[in-house]
Image: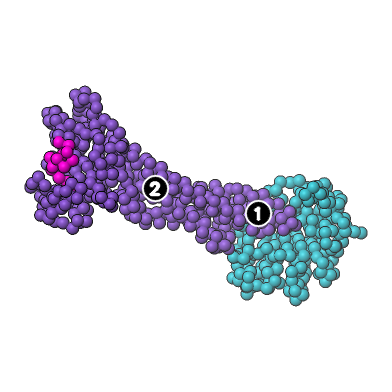
Amino acid sequence: MKLAKLAGNNLRRTPARSVLTAVSVLIATATLTVVLSVDRGYSKAVERDLVEKTGVHLYITKEGCPIEAAAVIAQGGLSPLYVEENLVDKVRAIPEVAAVLPFQLFTATTKDGSRTDIFMGITEEIRTIRPDWIITNGGWFSAENSVILGSQIAQIENVAPGDKLYSEKYDKEFVVSGILAQNWGQDDGTIFLPLKTAQKMIERKGKLSAIAIKLKDISQLQNVTLKLRGDLPKEYYVLGSKELSDGILGFFSATRVIMFVMVVVAFGVSVFGILNTMLMAVMERRREMAYLKCVGAKRRDILGLVTLESLILCSAGAIAGAGIGLALMPAADHLLRGLLIAYIPAGSITDPTLPLISLSILLTVAVGVLCALYPAWKAASIVPMEVLRNE
Amino acid sequence: MNSIVKLDTVSKIYRRGREEVQAIKNVSFEIFEGDQIAICGPSGSGKTTLLNLAGCMDHPTTGTISVEGKEVGQASESVLADIRSRTVGFVFQQFFLIPTLTVLENAALPLIFSNRVVPRDQVVSLLESVGLGHRLDHLPGQLSGGEMQRVAVARALINEPRLVLADEPTGNLDSRSAASVIELFDSLHSRGIAVVIVTHNPELAARCRKVVRIEDGTIAV
């Protein structure tokens, strides 16, 4: 018989306690796996959306606090920040620019606050600049009151091209001209309308939320950025899509902190559970440990035995936890999509990779083994004669 | 006859809180190959302490202890563990069997720590020799007290020690089980293994070749 088998047998002696401890390890590993996957997946998805996929290389926005602006828009208000529309022609005149999309973004919240619709005023250049923006049903705006719906909002409203849609807040009736292909992103819940209509609705004629720019050659990014920064009034920002994605990831950092606090709490509970279990196991088996020393067990054997018990317990919990974390990944993806305010990327926001799962397992097991060191040291320090005489 | 363990003017003082307890006072005692010794005496007289010192389970406060001619009184814990693993086998009143291990696994337990490889057949034959050939895969909870003590004896013998130390081996047994265990110790002696038994059982003491009486930590003459 090997020490590992003896350790496994010892764990079987108090099955309920062993299972509960393993469950606490499982929860900690599952949480860590999900959080690490979301942390990595969200960053990748934002970068993929805004840097790799959109075709937008630069944005022009107005100086100010973008978080405040986002908060105002999310609550159904109008952003105090806007870009003058007359800049569009200036930008178009730059030879390195391939396409320019001026847009106006605003929201409409129902009176009871139960629903907020996102509106985006656009021009036809969106088709050039956003290759993933595809109308699958119907066509482009046919009138001033035409709208193109994201797939999700179309499903919620149960409308098809030709159907009518009413906005209570703006007391305006729209006609659906097209429905977009689902792209699992922000577009799915957005109502697109002609830019001029949008500006009229919110009484911001000649004003834009921002201007998106696509360059003919990405290698000219630095030159064009510097040129725009030099030419435009000082109150304008010229942001690369990478800077924008970094900014969005900056908003995400608060969510990230909350997620990692959850991991710390789960680990705290797990550490307490392992320490408690191993200490109890050692205290209850002091006479047996003393007897093992009588039959030749050295300090290192007892240290090894207790550490192995913790290792088995934590490995089982960690492997099961990683599996459950993987199984919960779609649910976590769905849940977080509902919580994210800054930006909801298309595609999955979780990215569980083998090294990441291995890291979760290894980290949990390492913590478990560390927790066992004190109980193991206590067990190894037993003086057999004293224990057998006094207990 | 060859000496296995020799205690020379050994004393052992314990601390119990602020109080010092002198369990053994200047005791000299030697165990030779083939000995069969009963240690008798009233409770608290120092019998178990003497047995434990002879089994290298603790260091003496004063005096020397030699095992197979080598002074080990102040040896490291690792050296003492080696002696306990290879030279001495222990049997206790409470058996100390691990409840989730089978009879066969309990008997083979000390092999984990001695790093010896003993074929399964040899463990089985040892258990057969103590009358447990039909109980190999049973758990301790399925055995009688006498059977559990016989497993403990087999476990003490698995590393082929030269000396078996037993502390009240019949103390927890009914008379019938006690009789079978006494016979078992007789057979150990007949196999050439030195046996030292701490006991209150007069029948067991009477069957030993030599009886040592302890009173107040000293050997009574």
Return the chain for callout 2.
A
Label 2 belongs to which residue? A35
State how the image is colored: by chain
In the rendered view, tell whether residue B122 sits above or below residue A163: below
Q: Measured from the top left, where is residue B10 in percent x and y?
A: 83, 50
What hue does chain B carry in this figure?
A: cyan
Return the chain for callout 1.
A
Q: Amino acid at mark 1?
A: Ala
Q: Nearer the viewer, mark 1 or mark 2?
A: 2
- Considering every residue shown, the one lying at the far bottom of the view is B176
Tell whether A313 sits left or right of A120.
right
Check if residue A200 falls in the magenta segment: yes
Residue A357, visible in the rendered structure = no
Label 1 belongs to which residue? A297
Tell whether B59 sits left or right of A24.
right
Residue B220, visible in the rendered structure = yes
Q: Check residue A319 in the rendering and tell me which mark sits there, or answer none.
A: none
Range of residues picked out in magenta: A191-205
Of residue B122 and residue B61, the one placed in the foreground of this image is B61
Of residue B91 and residue A282, the one placed in the foreground of this image is A282
What residue lies at 87% left-to-right and 56% top-to-bottom? B216
What residue lies at 62% left-to-right and 55% top-to-bottom? A282
Distance of label 1 from label 2 (alpha carbons): 43 Å
What residue lies at 54% left-to-right and 63% top-to-bottom? A15
Quadrant, the C terminus of chain A: bottom right
Q: Check contact, mark 1 vs mark 2: CB within 8 A.
A: no
What hue does chain A carry in this figure?
A: purple
Q: Measured from the top left, where is residue A54 in percent x and y?
A: 21, 41
Instruction: Tell me the crowding category of disc 2: few under 14, some 14 to 19, or many 20 or more residues within 10 angstroms, Cα based.
Output: many
Check if residue A94 falls in the magenta segment: no
